[in-house]
């Protein structure tokens, strides 16, 4: 028999307003929309165990409730539930599914174990002295799956952030880590915080690693549920350096979106208008974004309504919010020569001399910048030379706090004594957040930071001069968002992390 016990607490917005307006006004008939039927969720967060308590599950369940309610779900949440409380809630959840609904979601955060290939969710009052006691003291996951499979008429989603170390391991004759893999019944997706049989780490912040990333992905418009969990898997793997890889088992037969995509542009004949004139979504969208400080909102409007009545105004707003980026000038080709660390102008100290030597050995695309005071900063393995020049110059300006110029690209000197850049090319505190102007990070990261611009408050973005970054959204306070973003950034670098933006405003010094 396979006796496995793993307990794993799981481990993140206001919804993107534009996406909600589109979903409500467009009346899409896709499976992602609510289509007049309810979306029902049962959330359980167990952390108050007598033996091996967990710090994250209750926070995870609370934050999931907040996000899911914003997405239109009817939510029941339990904290530190007993076996009787869990069983009763699961039965009532099944009864609720007898009513018409478009989606059913079950979320569990807490200790979970596997015994003889079956998975059990552990109530806080469980007294498990042996393997045999598990079946009478814990809640069989199959009980949940049965209720859903027997009653669900729409998409079913089961999320298990319960793959931690077995708290009863010493009482078992044999153990298997994590949870056992389960075959998903029809039209259901089962998500694990980590791969079957593996163990997920407990979190040190408000949320566990898995749930923290899930909270952020749930509110991104236009993602199918499979793509939501694919994004979570990539993010968790990156944060944990591959030590934790979330997993799914799916038998879905239709598409489901937590936040529907914008309606498709009409390409066929327009059907007859209904007796009552339908609401025109264009002015509603414009009213929603007209006071925005995010250029991407106006770009989205133009993409949706290229000949709209507010297109000219949108272009003017983009011009004000997104001034042309100042590209570091390249020196005339006639001035170029092979890079030699010894030929650099007087350097500030031994660490700068070491950096120059390291640059010579670094992998392209790369660039090195120098300041008037002899400070050196370089980047390597960039997407291209434009990205390398920009990041090297930003890093030099930040570290030296004086004028800088690009000295070499790849292994060729491009230094031009007449071309020096000052701090004017770095964003200033108080400016509207623009993902294209976030310093230090790679070009492809700037594209991904458009998700931050759409995320709900409270949110914060932390960056480091070496390109490390981390953003978090949907938190209960600004202080919580900044603390979580800084902690996540520090997991990926030894460099100093700093808060670059809070909300939609640049706040760094």
Image: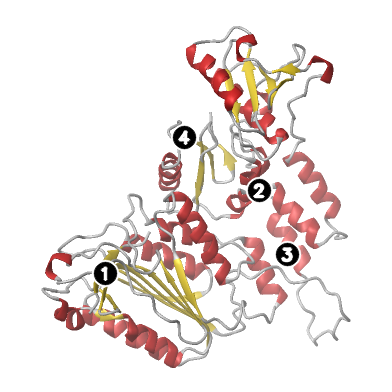
> Crowding near pointer 4: few (<14 within 10 Å), some, many (20+)?
many
Seen at 76% across and 58% down, the residue is: 301
State whether residue 291 is above or below residue 150.
Answer: above
Distance (Cα) linking label 1 and label 4:
39 Å
Considering depth in this image, is 270 or 392 the residue closer to the camera? 392
Tell me the residue that label 1 is attached to: 176
Q: Is residue 485 above or below residue 21?
A: above
Q: Which residue is mark 2?
A: 447
Residues 422 and 122: in front is 122
Question: Which of the marked residues, 2 or 1, is nearer the chain's N terminus?
Answer: 1
Is residue 284 positioned above or below 488 on the image? Answer: below
Foreground pick, 474 / 144: 144
Q: Is residue 134 visible?
A: yes
Q: Quadrant of residue 227?
A: bottom right
- Image spot of residue 503 (x, y percent): 55, 46
Dot label at residue 497: 4
Q: Quadrant of the N terminus?
A: bottom left
Element at badge 2?
helix
Crowd band around label 1 with a 10 angstrom C-alpha radius: few (<14), some (14–19), many (20+): many
Question: Circle 3 is placed at which residue position?
Answer: 284
Query: Which numbered disc, 4 or 3, marks the residue closer to the eye?
Result: 4
Kind of element beneath mark 4:
loop
**Element type where label 3 sits in the image:** helix
Mark 2 Cα shell of 10 Å, populated few (<14), some (14-19), many (≥20) = few
């Amino acid at each position: 028999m396979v006796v496995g016990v793993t307990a794993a607490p799981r481990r993140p917005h206001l919804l993107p307003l534009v996406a909600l307006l589109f979903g409500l006004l467009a009346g899409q008939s896709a499976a992602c929309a609510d289509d007049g039927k309810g979306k029902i969720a049962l959330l359980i967060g167990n952390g108050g165990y007598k033996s091996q308590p967990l710090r994250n599950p209750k926070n995870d369940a609370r934050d999931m409730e907040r996000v899911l309610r914003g997405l239109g779900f009817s939510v029941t949440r339990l904290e530190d539930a007993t076996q009787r409380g869990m069983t009763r809630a699961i039965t009532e959840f099944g009864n609720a599914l007898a009513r018409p609904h478009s989606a059913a979601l079950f979320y569990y955060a807490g200790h979970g174990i596997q015994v003889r290939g079956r998975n059990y969710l552990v109530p806080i009052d469980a007294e498990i002295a042996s393997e045999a006691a598990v079946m009478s003291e814990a809640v069989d996951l199959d009980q949940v799956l049965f209720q859903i499979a027997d009653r669900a008429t729409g998409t079913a989603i089961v999320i298990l952030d319960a793959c931690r170390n077995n708290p009863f391991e010493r009482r078992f004759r044999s153990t298997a880590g994590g949870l056992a893999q389960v075959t998903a019944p029809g039209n259901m997706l089962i998500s694990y915080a980590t791969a079957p049989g593996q163990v997920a780490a407990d979190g040190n912040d408000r949320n566990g690693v898995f749930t923290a990333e899930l909270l952020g992905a749930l509110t991104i418009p236009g993602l199918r549920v499979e793509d939501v969990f694919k994004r979570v898997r990539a993010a968790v793997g990156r944060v944990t350096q591959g030590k934790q890889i979330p997993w799914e088992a799916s038998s879905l037969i239709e598409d489901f979106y937590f936040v529907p995509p914008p309606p498709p542009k009409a390409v066929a004949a327009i059907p007859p208008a209904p007796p009552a004139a339908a609401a025109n979504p264009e002015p509603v969208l414009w009213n929603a974004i007209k006071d925005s400080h995010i250029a991407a909102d106006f770009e989205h409007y133009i993409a949706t309504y290229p000949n709209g009545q507010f297109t000219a105004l949108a272009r003017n707003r983009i011009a004000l919010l997104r001034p042309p980026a100042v590209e570091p000038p390249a020196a005339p080709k006639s001035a170029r020569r092979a890079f030699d660390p010894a030929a650099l102008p007087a350097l500030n100290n031994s660490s700068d001399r070491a950096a120059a030597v390291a640059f010579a050995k670094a992998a392209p695309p790369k660039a090195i910048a120098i300041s008037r005071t002899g400070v050196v900063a370089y980047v390597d393995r960039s997407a291209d030379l434009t990205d390398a020049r920009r990041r090297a110059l930003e890093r030099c300006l930040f570290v030296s706090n004086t004028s800088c110029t690009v000295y070499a690209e790849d292994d060729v000197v491009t230094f031009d004594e007449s071309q020096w850049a000052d701090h004017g090319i770095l964003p200033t505190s108080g400016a509207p957040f623009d993902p294209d102007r976030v310093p230090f990070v790679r070009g492809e990261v700037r594209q991904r930071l458009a998700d931050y611009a759409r995320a709900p408050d409270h949110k914060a973005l932390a960056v480091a001069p070496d390109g490390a970054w981390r953003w978090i959204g949907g938190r209960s306070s600004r202080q919580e968002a900044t603390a979580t973003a800084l902690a996540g950034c520090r997991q990926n670098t030894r460099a100093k992390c700093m808060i670059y933006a809070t909300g939609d405003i640049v706040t760094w010094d």
